[in-house]
Amino acid sequence: MTVARAAWYAYDEAPLRPFHLRVAVASFGGVFSDGFGLGIIGISLTHARAALHVTPWWLGLLGGASLAGLFVGALLAGPAADRRGRRPIYAYNMLLLAVFSALQFFVHTAPQLLALRLVVGFLLGTDYVVSKALLTEFTPRLLRGRVMSTLSVAWAAGYTCAYFAGYALSHHGPHAWRWMLASSAVPCLLVLPLRLTLPESPLWLAAHDRHAEASRVVARYLGPGVAPPSARLDPAPAAGRWAQLLSPAWQRRTLVACGFFTCQVIPYFAVGTFVTRVLDALHVGNSFVGGLVYNVSLLCGAVLGLLVVDRMPRRTFLVGSFALTALALMPLLVIDRPHAALIVVLFAVFAGVLSAASNLVYVYLPELFPTHLRASGIGLAIAASRIGSAVGTFLLPVVMSRYGVQAALGACIGVLAFGAVLCHAWAPETRHCALDAAA
């Protein structure tokens, strides 16, 4: 009597299971919360300026505070997630984020809000690291580009929904800005139960010689037809993880990761956080409508990026997006008093292309590093990007007030051009690589 053998798949080639969708939704919800938490600050500060006595300097500090907190959170979470596992941070950071988001309702001074925004940013930084790492390590290779791109759509959806939620709450009296800030706790609480039920990454378990646990996770959640991850292919590292990332073997990839992410987010946050102020400075008649178009373009661009991310080489997508966004802003510097409709269209193109390219943060960035360095590499890149974005967001209203909006937009064009040159020179192609091929 012949017994049929079960079909075995390599871990990285596993067929799509309902469990994969659970992990994707849990990560999607967390990244949506991240986008909402960062997006709500721009519109809430517009209503809180009088109550908190906000000057242009304080406006920049409060706008960039979460990004500064992100720097610390991402920098510390990466090595912690590589040493202790993805799940401890992934499971509980949404609970803490909900608590500190809700506490924003009770602030009475700008320094109090600044302190809470720093803590909120720290927690967002931890989620930026673990969401990318855990979802990357659970997702089969052939689906990884599209699945990881959903995180970009989730972030843009959260950022855009924050704009709509802020507008909907803007008519609720003098304390409307408090409700706007506290509303960012809601998506965190909604996703928390799903986060608590997910297991540790089998790739991380195997990389730390916990093969029996990795096998149990794979058998329970992916089925007996999927082989657990193989033993670690690379020798146990002697140096610390940051030292490895800066070593000759990995320094070019580390530089590309930090450089492309930083050059993306500086104009993304600087313009996005204060888009209505930028449009007012360019004499667009209805800056709210312009801001609405801008934020809808962010969401549409993220969906467009999801559709094309696996249809073209990563390098082409990366370099081309930098060039197109720089060209979209250029007419605003060379045309004397452009028409309001042209300004809105150019900003829509800028937002759409930049948002489409942000898919690569979720797809390309984890592919640059092997498992034992993935969270640390992602964390270092996020930390570097948040230095740039925090400084850019702080400086934009200050530069606009002193030198004009053209100077601020010119600086954004320079950052985008630098990103194009850097990626053209050094960015590797990773489209068809297995996760640990580099190791």
Image (cartoon, grey):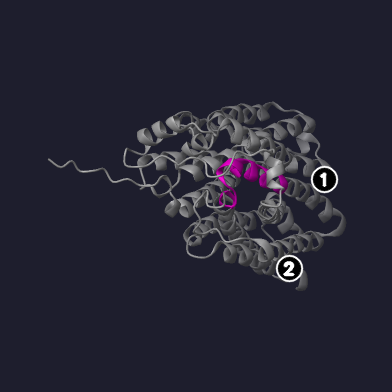
Give the residue drawn at x 43%, y 54%.
142
Amino acid type, mark 2:
Leu
Which residue is tagged 1? 56
Q: Is residue 344 above or below residue 25?
A: below
Q: Is residue 231 left or right of residue 360?
A: left
Which residue is tagged 2? 332
Quadrant containing the N terminus is top left
Is residue 215 covered in magenta?
Answer: no
Distance CA(mark 1)–CA(mark 2)? 24 Å
Between residues 126 and 395, which one lies in front from this camera angle?
126
- Residue 373 at x, y percent in the picture: 61, 43
- Residue 87 at x, y percent in the picture: 53, 31
Q: Is residue 17 left or right of residue 4?
A: right
> Which residue in the rendered view is the most extreme toward the left?
1
Between residues 62 and 90, which one lies in front from this camera angle?
90
> Which residue in the rendered view is the most extreme toward the front?
235
Give the residue drawn at x 51%, y 65%.
312
Range shown magenta:
365-385
Residue 18 got which mark? none
Q: Is residue 352 visible?
A: yes
For numbered disc 1, what is the local secondary structure?
helix
Amino acid type, mark 1:
Pro
Between residues 38 and 176, which one lies in front from this camera angle?
38
Name the chief secondary structure element in magenta.
helix
Residue 243 sits in quarter: top right
